[in-house]
Amino acid sequence: MTVRAALDGHGMQDAVDVVELLTSELVTNAYLHTEGPASLRLTGLSGGRLRVGVWDSDPCIPAPFGGAGGDCVPLAPADAGAGRGLRLVQEYADSWGGWALGDGALGRGVGKLLWFEVGGRATLPLLRK
């Protein structure tokens, strides 16, 4: 709801479906795979582009965001109940990336930031109205 409200409020309705889906995937991964806080940030860029960043407390960066596993996330088996989220980001975002964030107290990492960008007119082919 937060993403939809922010994009609607800034006249970016064309990007709502893509951004809502991909943001949900990254936030869900942060919730499921970390034990600590997480945050979401939406940043408007020039040319109607939008960057979405999700920070969490785990420094492990998954592929395709720069972690081990190469540039292409393998397809999940047809009967799998999970495993499609990062592939969706790879397919529908214009660009994406991630990086581990510094060193915290006592030499512990302070997590990672995963991000993606979409243009002002991003749409999901199957979700067009």
Image (spheres, grey):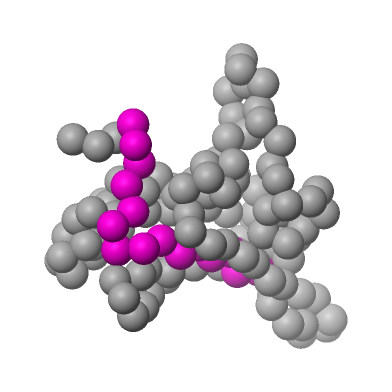
Q: Position of residue 82 (x, y in %)?
A: 59, 29
Determine the residue positioned at 36% across, 63% down.
119
Tell whether 48 sits left or right of 73: left
From this view, report whether residue 127 is shown above or below residue 114: above
Determine the image quadrant of residue 127: top left
Would residue 38 be visible to someone looking at this image? no
Nearer-the-camera pick, 94 or 42 = 94
Tell whether 61 sits left or right of 129: right
Q: Position of residue 125 (x, y in %)?
A: 34, 36
Would residue 102 be visible to someone looking at this image? yes
Q: Position of residue 6 (x, y in %)?
A: 23, 64
Determine the residue positioned at 67% across, 59% down.
65
Determine the image quadrant of residue 80: top right
122 part of magenta stretch? yes
Determine the residue positioned at 57% across, 49% down.
90
19 part of magenta stretch? no
From this view, report whether residue 110 is shown above or below residue 7: below
Tell whether 31 sits left or right of 128: right
Which residues are the magenta region? 111-126
Residue extending farthest to the top is: 79
Report the number of numbered marks. Answer: 0
Which quadrant of the figure contains the C terminus?
A: top left
Determine the residue positioned at 84% across, 81% down.
107
From this view, report whether residue 20 is shown above or below residue 81: below
Tell whether 86 sits left or right of 122: right
From this view, report whether residue 20 is shown above or below residue 3: above
Determine the image quadrant of residue 105: bottom right
Q: Position of residue 12 (x, y in %)?
A: 21, 62
